[in-house]
Every structure is written in structure tokens, then in C-alpha cells.
Image (spheres, grey):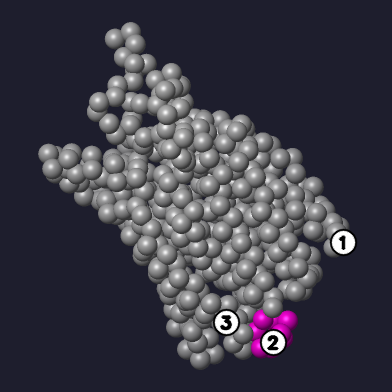
Amino acid sequence: MKKALRATLLGNFMEWFDIGVFAYVMTYIALVFFPLPAPWDSLATYATLAVTFLVRPLGGLILGPIGDKVGRRKVLAFTILMMSFGTFLIGCLPGYDTWGIFAPILLILLKFVQGFSTGGEYAGAATFIAEYASDRRRGFWGSFLDLGSYLGFAAAATLATVIEVIGGEQFMTEWGWRICFWVALPLGIVGVYMRSHIQESHAFEAQNDSNDKQSAKAGRKSIMDELKAVIGEHWQHLLIGAAMVMCAQVVGYAVTTYMPEYLSDVLGYDTLHGNALLVPVLIIVSVGLPIFGAVSDRIGRRPVMLTGCIVGVVGAIPAFLLMMMGHTWSTFLGLLIMGIIMMFQVSVQASALPSLFPTKVRYTAMGIMFNIAVAIFGGTTGFVITALANVFHTDMMGAFYIMLACVVGAIGVYFMKESSGRNLQGSMPAVENEEEVEDVLENLEENEKYDLSTMPIDIVKDPRVNKGS
């Protein structure tokens, strides 16, 4: 479990390290690649960041079915390789002054490469860890994926800050910002090695054996046929998951990609002091995620997520009002409130979402649902808030958008079936050690949490299913 977690965690670290680097050097990206008057320079840079998320669904649509066919491990090794090389090459690109219009075009193309690879990253990592984790502690182990994500963002912010402090603004503008992107290559190489030396999940192996027998009789389906089948059979769960993803990702991206620009452009903080306020919040959030994940294992995913939605609706406006007071302490407190809202949602995302779908289509369904929702609502958060703020002339637009996302998330949670302590659809009960096996077997038929009807076994029949027949 721990070996698998380290390998998958590094990929999420890489994904958000790239997003964080781009967000924290956005001012220099705009100067180098988009020499336009305000606010068009910021909007062009936000739009370039959004490109990464707009192409994510394509990556999910292609890599998801492949992951359900050949295995999660192979696809995850491929995604981290593409992410690291894409990030490294961005740091090598000449600017607009050297290559003219071709510079921003190549930048956008590389963001396409990153977006395609990340389309299979989180969906695959969450699927992999959910299948590896025990039913009793899936929330706790799953929360570490997003811990890696926000530590990656905090690492990016720290690296950008240190380089700027040492080299100064002129150095950052000339080529110092590139160092942040170059760091991705060695991290990616380590990630590929780690992911190449982990074992495939037992849930996938059991399902794959069953699929091979069925495919031998019925013939293998094409990727397009599988996508149609997933959407046709699981459209309700796809919508439920998308609502929860919108809630978590809007809050998450508001903190991580919108706040750096908001702190500097609206509140007047320089990059150094803005990062000094935001990085501790991200570290607090990262440390708190496993705690929230463990709580969800005890009281359920639904209570944790629903509480977060309520806190988001009630706390978003006070958080922004605190930041707008102009004091360092009040700005930090406002950011911390937003971080707490984020913890409720993000901490259980990696355990709640995979439980919506059966093993045989889990990677595919996760790739479709998660990436389309992130593309529409997550990666565009900074762009949408900035555009609406300019249209309606209010600095509170971020709070209103977060409140809307929390309302949508609450609707999704209301229709979601509780998954805490239950076996994944299409999977056997999962335990952490041999001592738990006997207890599970003794209570298998009586425990209402276990759904025997979907387990990949023929010899055990659930007596509850046959009652009354």
C-alpha cells in the first residue's frame, strides 16, 4: 500500500507542481509570451492555463479505456513521463521577442501535451489507490493523493519565491522563471522508475481475468463502444460525480490559481508577501487532509462533504471580506477559511468518486467524469472569476462563484450513495492484514455494507438478493 501510494502521490505532486509553477510565475509568462495591455495579458495567460484543462477530457477518453484494458500501472507510468517532459520543455521555449507569434503557439501546444497526460493522471491514481486500499481505511489512504497535490503546489510557490528573492525581479523576467519548469524533468524520471516497479491492483487483475473470459466469447469492444456503454449505463453517477468535482475543484483552483493573482492585482501584495501568506495555508491544508479522510472512514463521506458545502456557502463572503480589510492577519485568516472549505471536499474526493463505478469501467468512467468537470469548472476558475469581476465591477465575484459551486456540490452529495466501509463495486472486500480476513468472512452475509452481487466470484451467492424469489 505504502509503495503504491508513494508512486501515485509523486504523479499528483508533479501535476500540481506544474500548475503551481505556472500560476506563480504567471506575471513573467505574460511578459515573455503575451506582451499585451492589461487586463488582456492576464486573461491571455489564464486562457493558456485553461487550455491544459480543456484538453484533459480527450486524455481521459483515450487513456481511461486503455487503463481498463492494459492496467492502471502502465498508463500511470506514461502520464508522468509526458507531464514531466512537457513541463521541462516549457522552460526551454524562447519568448515572443525571439520567435514572435510562434512562441505563444508552442506554449499552448505544450500545455495541450500536459493536459492530455493529466487527463489520465488523477483518474488513474484515484482508481489505483482506491483499489489498493482497505475498505475500512480507504478515505484515509485516498486523502494522501491530494496531500501530494497541494504539497506540489506549495513546493512550486516556495521554489518561485526563493529564486525571486535570490535573483531579483529582473533575473526572473530574463530566465529565472525557467528554472522552476526544469526541475520537473528529474522528478518525472524518478516517478517513472517508481511506477514501473509497483504491482498492479488485485481488483483489476481479478476483473481482467473475468473480462478475458467474457471477451473470448463475445469479442473485444472498441474504445468507442466502451465509452458509449459507460455513458449509457452510468450517466446518473457521472452527473453525481461531476457535481462533487465542480464543488471541490472550484474551491481548490480559486485558492491555488486565482489567489496568487488576486493577492497581487487586487489586494496589492507583492509576490514575496503573497506567497508568504498562501504557502502556510497550503501546508496546513495538506496536513489536514488525512485527518478529514480518516474522519470520513468513521462517520461517512456524505456527512463530511455536505458539511463542507454548508461551510462554503456560509463562509465564502466573510473570507473575502477579511482579505479585503487590508491587514496581514485578516488576509491570512480569510485564506485559511477558504483552505478549510477546500479540506472538507478534497479530502474525500479520491475515495468517494471511484466508489461510484464498478471495477471493469472505473478508470474509463473516472476519466470521463473527472476531466470534463475539471475542464469546464476547475481549470477555468481563475479566468471565469476574472472575467465576471471585470463585467460586474466587483472584487467579491470569487466568493459568489464558490458559493454557487458548493450549492451544486451539495446536490451531488444528496444523491450519492454512502461508500465508507463498503467494498468497491465489482471488487472483493479489501483488508489491510490477515487478522481482518476471518472477521470479514464470518460476517460477510450478515453485513449490509457488503454487496456480494457485484463481486467477481461465481460460487458465492448473496442470500439477500434471492429473498422473496
Magenta highlight on residue 465: no
Q: Secondary structure at mark 1?
A: loop
Please name the residue shown 29% across and 42% down the image. 206
Alpha-carbon span between mark 3 and mark 2: 11 Å
Whether residue 444 is visible to the viewer of this picture, yes or no, is yes
- The amino acid type found where label 1 is placed reads His
- Compared to residue 320, the image places residue 360 above or below, namely above
Mark drawn on residue 327: 1
Mark drawn on residue 179: 3
Please name the residue shown 46% across and 33% down the image. 436
- Which one is in front, 69 or 246? 69
Mark drawn on residue 133: none
- Which one is in front, 2 or 317? 2
Q: Nearer the viewer, mark 1 or mark 2?
A: 2
- Compared to residue 221, the image places residue 112 above or below, namely below
Tell me which label, 3 or 2, sits earlier in the chain.
Answer: 2
Percent position (x, y) of residue 178?
A: 56, 82
- Compared to residue 145, the image places residue 461 above or below, namely above
Query: Where are the magenta residues, as a range?
Result: 163-172
Point out the image quarter for the C terminus.
Answer: top left
Q: What secondary structure characterizes most of the magenta part?
A: helix
- Compared to residue 73, the image places residue 451 above or below, namely above
Mark drawn on residue 167: 2
Q: Is residue 306 left or right of residue 83?
A: right
- The amino acid type found where label 2 is placed reads Gly
Q: Residue furthest left?
A: 217
- The amino acid type found where label 3 is placed reads Ile
Disc 3 + disc 2, Cβ < 8 Å:
no
Please name the residue shown 79% across and 58% down the image. 332
Q: Nearer the viewer, mark 3 or mark 1?
A: 3
